[in-house]
Image (tube, helix red, strand yellow):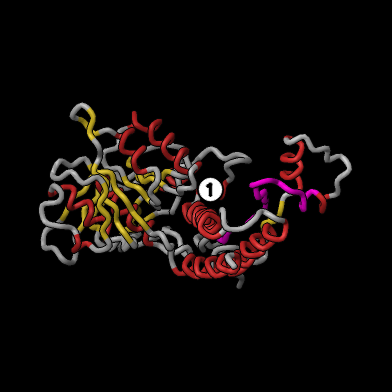
Amino acid sequence: MGLPEILISFQQKAVTAVRGSSRGMAAVLLDDNTKEQFLTPYRREKDIGEGSWSEDNLELLKLMFKGKPQKVLAVRMLKKDGAADLEGTLKEILPVNIDYLAFPGFASGQITEIKAFLNEAREKGKKVKMVLPDCDADCEHIINFAARRVTAKWDDREEVASYTGAQYTCRIAGILAGLPLTRSSTYFVLDEVVDAQLEQDPDGAVDAGKFIIIFDGEKYKVGRGVTSLTKVSEERPEDLKKIKIVEGMDVILHDIHTTYEENYVGKVVNSYDNKQMFVGAVNDYFRKLEGSVLDGNGENYVEISAELNREYLEEHGVDTTDMTEQELKEANTGAWMLLEGTCKFLDAAEDLKLRMYM
């Protein structure tokens, strides 16, 4: 009686998605020779053992925890010919579920490798985003942190700390991994910051896909929670400029993918009734997200795709000319469950226009 478990799993995932991402993992690529362990997950800052990392890298891990992610994953970069091997390291972490990955050692010449990694990870159902310093990537899965210097005063330290923009990407990745889906990073207050490199034209910087720090006269905070995407198209619409929207899409796709894999694959026959059972579970999951993640006034649903079923049947030599839409939906499609649907995501309140009359 496996199918009802899907309903329960989706209900739990919907509740978790609203309260905060069930994954919530921030990770960082570190060039470090202190020890040899490749992957080290931490749930609390105090779990980081003495002597496990260089002093500089230990500071980066502490920065990440300031954002309150559920977990921090330290990735000790592999070596090749005595130097950090980015390609080899990224290949090894492909199977790992990561939300936001910082790479303080990023150089502009590495963007091709990074985009290839992100594309392959997403093909495998991994919804990782990267936070990179000063990187005009034009990619919805890369956050371009533009501030090149940040000075901070932490409550638990007497001295002031100075960070490069590359180092501070760890703080940003931790913040993004720790935020619930119901809010964006726009105007997130950076209480520790006492000075930072600011943009002379903040509006232009945001439009250019830069994740910036602003100062409102009293406090430093995030400007607007944007990805580095600048060139929009039918395949990459305007919505994908917002980190909150991309994160919402990622959580939903991840939840559907993992629930299908864990509760359905190999456990039930691919009959029309079982397809409809899964479709009903997904749509129930969508309804639970309406009003918090999804727009309840929009269309949020999946259904068996008559068109995709037609393509499958014709590829397998079946003449579909006289088949009705319902017959196509009920057709045997082997091991494939072919669905289509739509979602309308809710953005956070960020802009205000008030017209008053006297």
Near-viewer residue (66 or 12)? 12
Residue that carries the numbered disc 1 in the rendered image? 240
Near-viewer residue (26 or 275)? 275
Please state the horizontal and vertical placement of residue 265, each as a whole percent of the image.
Answer: 56, 54
Q: Is residue 96 left or right of residue 3?
A: left
Q: Is residue 74 left or right of residue 242?
A: left
| Residue drawn at 56 percent across, 53 percent down | 266
Q: Quadrant of the N terminus?
A: bottom right
Magenta-drawn stretch contains 141: no
Q: Is residue 246 above or below residue 109?
A: below
- Can residue 20 be seen in this snapshot? yes
| Residue drawn at 13 percent across, 47 percent down | 54
Q: Is residue 300 above or below residue 31?
A: below
- Magenta part of the protein: which range? 328-346
The kind of residue on which mark 1 rests is: Leu
The total of numbered circles placed on residues is 1
Please state the horizontal and vertical placement of residue 236, each as a whole percent of the image.
Answer: 57, 42
Q: Is residue 334 above or below residue 295?
A: above
| Residue drawn at 79 percent across, 38 percent down | 318
Magenta-drawn stretch contains 335: yes
